[in-house]
Amino acid sequence: MSRSNSNDPEPVVSQKMIGLFIVAGADVILLVVLLAAVGVTSWTAALGISGFILAVFGAWVVFRWWQLRPDTAEDEESERERSEEESPLETLKARYAAGELSDEEFESKLDRLLGSDEEFEAAVRARESEEDGRETKMLTDENR
């Protein structure tokens, strides 16, 4: 089965791993269980060999998972770079530098962009002071 998107992450358990487990591991497990069933070997040996094979396969899966897990530090850094590259201010500067915007257009868009940031910060400050007021009122009501 082929993957349709080349950006899809690699699976932890690949088809190759499953094939090797079936050919090398499952066959041996089946063989030792059959030998134990007919009395050629003990059930303890059969269970030990089967457990060992399953443990090796499990360790292989854990190792693959550890190899393929995303490196969070690199992901956070690339996300930060991406967000910096895509910021509206950077886009506006790039368009102005490329000559797509006149001086007046640039200044107007810059004022609007910076004004929206100031409005957002003012709304956040107002909400925080409102919450502080509620907490103060609750504390004074409790002290009565």
Image: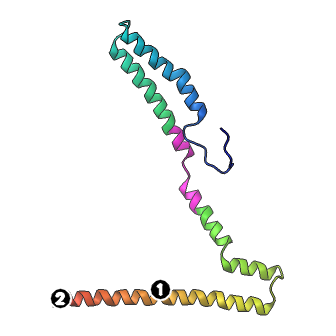
Distance of label 2 from label 1 (alpha carbons):
29 Å
| Residue found at x 44% / y 90% | 126
**Residue 105 relative to residue 75: left or right:** right
| Residue found at x 52% / y 87% | 121
- Describe the colour scheme in one phrase: rainbow
Instruction: Report x, y in % for residue 34.
Output: 41, 13
Quadrant placement of the N terminus: top right
Report the number of numbered marks. 2
**Residue 36 relative to residue 20: left or right:** left
Q: Which residue is mark 1?
A: 124
Q: Is residue 142 above or below residue 82?
A: below
Give the image quarter of residue 68.
Answer: top right
| Residue found at x 55% / y 30% | 18
Instruction: Report x, y in % for residue 127.
Output: 42, 87
User: Which is more N-terminal, label 1 or label 2?
Assistant: 1
Instruction: Give yes or no for contact between labels 2 and 1 (Cβ–Cβ under 8 Å).
Output: no
Instruction: Report x, y in % for residue 88.
Output: 67, 78
Q: Which residue is mark 2?
A: 143
Quadrant placement of the C terminus: bottom left
Furthest toward the right, the residue is 99
Q: Amino acid at mark 2?
A: Asn
- The range drawn in magenta is 63-76
The verdict on residue 142 being magenta is: no
Instruction: Report x, y in % for residue 134.
Output: 31, 88
